[in-house]
């Protein structure tokens, strides 16, 4: 039930939804003054959340800073979301694949001895594509030994990532702390949830959105594509707040 509720809530909190909602409300309103207010509100929300400069500033604040690790670790927990399903049921790497690259490098350099892929099927179709199973085939192509790959393919969200990963790690008697590999924008929420679940982890963020410090006047020009990035950050902020209530 929580899984379905979170999917619905995510849709309702996205800036794109509110732009459309306010616009439609303006179109169907019969009173000119109220119609005008809805249109102004819709335009204001669009201008705010399509502003590249505002996104860059917020991303610079929210993204978990880069971390340098030393020593050896028994395992890196690699959270999914970087592979998507093709029409033929197979997978492909999407724009979030940097976390896969980082985890693979940790293994090939000997920083970790095992990789735990934690990702099931986050769609509402339970028999669909399971990311962790496909990712394992890709790690094998990079000559990562089968014995060093752990798979957790039942989780549907970050709460289940933590819960199910803990069981796998305990069953394999791998000693903590573990490296937690996920996107920099997702790390704050993931780190909080894993620690709350009693899984000792050290953050190892990847996949940074551009946080270029040099100012450009082009950043003042609204870009519709920025809305999708705000959808991600809105989900993370609301998800972080809700994590304390679960």
Image (tube, rainbow, N blue to C red):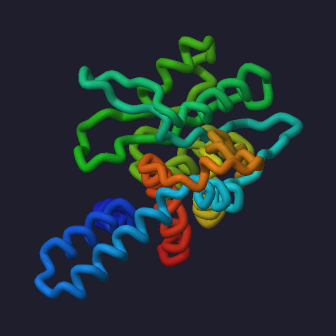
Residue 70 appears in the rendering? yes
Residue 191 appears in the rendering? no
Residue 132 position in % (x across, y down): 45, 33
Q: Is residue 1 left or right of residue 219?
A: left
**Quadrant of res 116:** top right
- Image height of 54 relative to 215, above or below: below
What residue is at 33 percent from the left and 30 percent from the top?
A: 85
Residue 18 position in % (x across, y down): 33, 68
**Quadrant of res 109:** top right
Between 118 and 243, the one lying in front of the other is 243
Q: Is residue 235 left or right of residue 106?
A: left
Residue 39 position in % (x across, y down): 29, 73
**Quadrant of res 108:** top right
Q: Residue furthest right?
A: 70
Between 174 and 4, the one lying in front of the other is 4
For the N terminus, the quadrant is: bottom left
- Image height of 27 relative to 227, above or below: below
What residue is at 26 percent from the left and 36 percent from the top?
A: 128
Between 210 and 168, the one lying in front of the other is 210
What residue is at 60 percent from the left and 21 percent from the top?
A: 147
């Amino acid at each position: 039930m929580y899984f379905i509720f979170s999917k619905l809530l995510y849709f309702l909190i996205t800036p794109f939804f509110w732009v459309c909602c306010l616009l439609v409300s303006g179109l169907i309103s019969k009173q000119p003054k109220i119609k005008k207010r809805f249109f102004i509100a819709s335009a204001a929300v669009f201008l705010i959340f399509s502003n590249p400069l505002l996104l860059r500033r917020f991303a610079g604040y929210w993204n978990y800073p880069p971390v340098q690790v030393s020593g050896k670790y028994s395992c890196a927990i690699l959270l999914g979301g970087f592979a998507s399903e093709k029409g033929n049921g197979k997978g492909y790497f999407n724009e979030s694949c940097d976390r896969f690259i980082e985890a693979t490098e940790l293994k090939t350099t000997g920083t970790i001895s095992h990789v735990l892929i934690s990702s099931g099927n986050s769609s509402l179709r339970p028999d669909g594509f399971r990311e962790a199973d496909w990712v394992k085939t890709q790690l094998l192509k990079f000559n990562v030994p089968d014995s060093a790959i752990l798979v957790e393919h039942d989780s549907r969200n970050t709460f289940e990532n933590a819960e199910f990963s803990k069981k796998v790690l305990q069953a394999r008697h791998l000693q903590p702390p573990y490296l937690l590999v996920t996107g920099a924008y997702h790390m704050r929420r993931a780190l909080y949830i894993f620690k709350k679940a009693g899984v000792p982890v050290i953050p190892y963020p990847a996949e940074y959105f551009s946080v270029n410090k040099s100012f450009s006047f082009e950043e003042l020009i609204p870009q519709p594509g920025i809305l999708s990035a705000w959808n991600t950050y809105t989900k993370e902020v609301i998800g972080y707040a809700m994590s304390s209530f679960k």
